[in-house]
Amino acid sequence: MAPLAYSSILLTLFLTLSLFHSSLAARKLSESDQELQLFKYHKGPLLSGKISINLIWYGKFKPSQRAIISDFITSLSSSPSKPTSQPSVAKWWKTTEKYYHLTTTRNNKSPNLALSLGTQILDENYSLGKSLNDNQILKLASKGAQKNAINVVLTAADVTVDGFCSSKCGSHGSSAGARINGKSLAARKLSESDQELQLFKYHKGPLLSGKISINLIWYGKFKPSQRAIISDFITSLSSSPSKPTSQPSVAKWWKTTEKYYHLTTTRNNKSPNLALSLGTQILDENYSLGKSLNDNQILKLASKGAQKNAINVVLTAADVTVDGFCSSKCGSHGSSAGARINGKRYKFAYIWVGNSETQCPGQCAWPFHQPIYGPQNPALVAPNNDVGLDGMVINVASLLAGTATNPFGNGYFQGPKEAPLEAASACTGVYGKGAYPGYAGNLLVDPTTGASYNANGINGRKYLVPALFDPKTSSCATLV
């Protein structure tokens, strides 16, 4: 296909000034998943010719802040008259030319791209408000030139955008622009496959159903009081008429997952039901596999629990390292074929979560510890007075929701199967209404301890649980 020379394109990109912790759940890639990850050319056009990069500043930015970005854009192109110290931004950008050298047009020539800083548009009065959706981002991007241009929307620190922090730090896309000289400046819209990936949908696989026991495998040293924090949380997932809990409750939070079940019907047109209960607790205080574990060893530990009608949760102590812990994940969930029971082999689901208190509390126990990156707001007081364990509750809660609604990798999720966004991970960092990067939202505060929470549990417990993606409203649902 010919490059997009002399044609027109409107690309949208929003970038933000805030980053903060994200709790990631990962699983091992199969060979077929690895095939999908091959980096290859799919025969479409690349940008070519002289392209202006126009900046649309949305919200309050200091002139010095705007200069940082505009100087970066200008630095992409090297100028013989103004040599830059090496290594330079221009040298970094030259790597993209290799893609162009691999691409030839109909006349067997490689396309060329020349970028330059275009116009800068200021919208300091928040013309569309401080909470934006994708359509509004596109509307802002459309303020820039719509021919031979990349329009970059930059939103200020006090602006929230759908999916920001929960699933993205920025995005890019394309859209049909206005008509110029009778010609529609049409760039390609997202393909159907691209749009499919962006939808939170059901992939036709089974959900967990029936009576499921949650078995806890404690690996390493945990105090009895620490184990009680987690076991009480698991018991709190089910409401008991004989033991009513103050509202809002953990049980009420968990009911959001029932909406996924109501949208799913079995062969007899009935929605499946799920009833969770606390199962057995297994202690491995002697570190039987050592203090440095890999994924296979996590599975080996998970296999110690029942392998039928069960979720086996491996909880590793603060002095145990696990492959990928802190660097790419705070926990994970998966499934495996268990032992044969009465001649039949069952699949069981499992979860692993680590205690991050001494390794990476800013990443895996936020907001009870200041984040590694982003706004450094004061840490909140942990409701059970244990930063590590209260952080574990958040991650256990998130992964339980993901396990119930996507236990075997073909349930409810958004995005690619190898890195899905699930019921809770689609709402990372949101705990109450009004949440934005670095701020967990409007939470309840215990007047005695000053601890922040949003859900009540059994035995007078208070917990902080993550927002869950509501499949009926396509939004993140919070208790408070």
Image: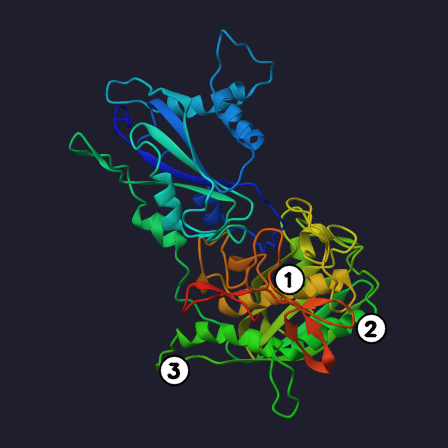
Instruction: Estimate the spatial distance between the alpha carbons at disc 3 and disc 2, rounded to whole Å.
Output: 42 Å
- Quarter-of-image position of residue 355: bottom right
Residue 180: x, y in percent?
Answer: 21, 31
Quarter of the figure with the N terminus: top left
The residue where tag 1 is placed is 395
Task: Count residues near mark 1 (Cα–Cα under 10 Å), then give few for <14, some for 14-19, many for 20+.
Answer: many
109 sits left or right of 246 in the view: left
Residue 132: x, y in percent?
Answer: 44, 51
Residue 408: x, y in percent?
Answer: 50, 64
- Of the pair 364 and 155, the residue shown nearer to us: 155
Residue at 38% x, 42% y is: 140
The residue where tag 2 is placed is 224
Q: Which mark is residue 270?
A: 3
Q: Which mark is residue 137?
A: none
Instruction: Estimate the spatial distance between the alpha carbons at disc 2 and disc 1, rounded to whole Å.
Output: 20 Å
Task: State the SS at label 2.
Answer: helix
Instruction: Estimate the spatial distance between the alpha carbons at disc 1 and disc 3, rounded to whole Å.
Output: 31 Å
Residue 347: x, y in percent?
Answer: 54, 69
Quarter of the figure with the C terminus: bottom right
Tag 2: amino acid: Pro
Mark earlier in primary sequence (3, 2) = 2
- Of the pair 236 and 222, the residue shown nearer to us: 236
Mark earlier in primary sequence (2, 1) = 2
The reply to whether the C-beta atoms of the residues labelled 1 and 3 are less than 8 Å apart is no
Task: State the SS at label 3.
Answer: loop
Is residue 100 something one can see in this rendering?
yes
The answer to whether residue 67 is above or below residue 230 is above
- Quarter-of-image position of residue 96: top left
29 sits left or right of 236 in the view: left
Is residue 308 something one can see in this rendering?
no
Residue at 55% x, 60% y is: 434
